[in-house]
Amino acid sequence: MKQVISIVVPCYNEEEALLVTAKKIEEKITTLKKNDKFKCITDYSVYFVDDGSQDGTWNLIQQLNEQNKLFCGIKLSRNKGHQNALLAGLVTAKETSSAVISMDADLQDDIDAIDEMLDKYLAGVDVVYGVRSSRATDTFFKRVTAQGFYKFLRFFSDNPQNIIYNHADYRLMSRRAIEGLESYSEINLFLRGIVPDIGYKQDVVCYERRERVAGESKYPLKKMWAFAVQGITSLSIKPMRLITMLGFLLFFTSLVMLSYFLIRHFTGHTVVGWSTLAVSVWGIGGLIQMSIGVCGEYI
Ligand code: UDP
Ligand code: MG
């Protein structure tokens, strides 16, 4: 069977890294074409997705396309975020490809892991995850927050096995896996949590995470926090269940307190008005919290 492979690269203000990355990808594709193992792959494409960059990223993508038709460009109307840029690339590339590999624009993901990904894909695997074997090149802060995040996510997730430790968005997906992804109507996109849920045969390849080739991280603390919240809210119902449980707990505590205050009231051990006030605060607070939880379940 003839195979067409595409590589999707989300780019946000990546003018410093883009040309280096494009060259590296082109070289990689040239060596893949020479490899007999991958003879059945008849064509390759590279999709750079410009996620509303304010620098010269789009101009560079256009130049690359003019020089070499291997490179294509997708331009989003504004900065929609890494996950949306990735999704736009995947669904566009899928139209003309049998499998799509997504990777970052900064070459932190080892491009040589593609060989192993393709090996597995050609052996019948639909999703191949790139997993970092170490985070030695990450800053101390990034390492601690990222690892804490994975642990937190596993704790909260309804399906902890769906969280692939140390996997970012470097992965290969077959066309049918991407079609599976399209059937999710999730708005708070957190691809690395949704993809394992698609099913089909899945596997991992390990690689060493490198330094960013040029430029700075496009994930400042604010974006990382929003991403973490997205991960938890799109993967887990547990926080909402906790709210409902707390509501029930408060409400039942208020009933116990009601009996206690009534006893204190009738035995004359309390100030006038205190019992009504205390029970109302606890009772109403509990009821409101419980109702929010129940509404949440329906929504
Ligand atoms: N990115 C994007 N939109 C954004 C932020 C980042 O498309 O709003 C891209 C970015 O250009 C890069 C990838 O997502 O290709 C990962 O970002 P980065 O390398 O800055 O993240 P880090 O490796 O520091 O977590
Ligand atoms: Mg990076």
Image (cartoon, rainbow, N blue to C red):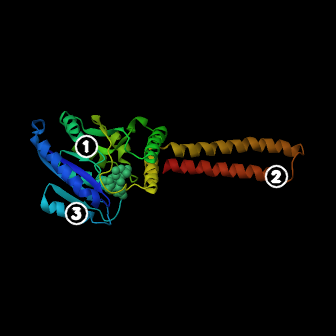
Residue at 14 percent of width and 63 percent of height = 66
In the depicted structure, whether residue 186 falls above or below residue 206: below
Q: Position of residue 255 (x, y in %)?
A: 72, 43
Residue at 45 percent of width and 49 percent of height = 228
Q: Residue furthest right?
A: 268
Q: CA distance from mark 3 to mark 2?
A: 72 Å
Name the quarter where the N terminus is drawn.
top left
Sequence-first tag of 3 and 2: 3
Rendered image: mark on residue 84: none
- What is the three-letter code of the residue carrying label 2? Trp
Rendered image: mark on residue 60: 3
Q: Position of residue 45 (x, y in %)?
A: 16, 51
Nearest the camera: 69 or 180? Answer: 69
Nearest the camera: 38 or 175? Answer: 38
- What is the three-letter code of the residue carrying label 3? Leu
Q: Which residue is mark 1?
A: 173
**SS under mark 3:** helix
Which one is in front in this view, the residue at disc 1 or the one at disc 2? 1
Q: Quadrant of ligand 1?
A: bottom left
Q: Position of residue 96 (x, y in %)?
A: 16, 51
- What is the three-letter code of the residue carrying label 1? Met
Residue at 27 percent of width and 66 percent of height = 56
Left or right side of 95 for 195: right
Mark 3 neighbour density, 10 Å: few (under 14) some (14–19) many (20 or more): some
Rendered image: mark on residue 274: 2
Q: CA distance from mark 1 to mark 3?
A: 27 Å
Confirm whether residue 1 shows in the render.
no
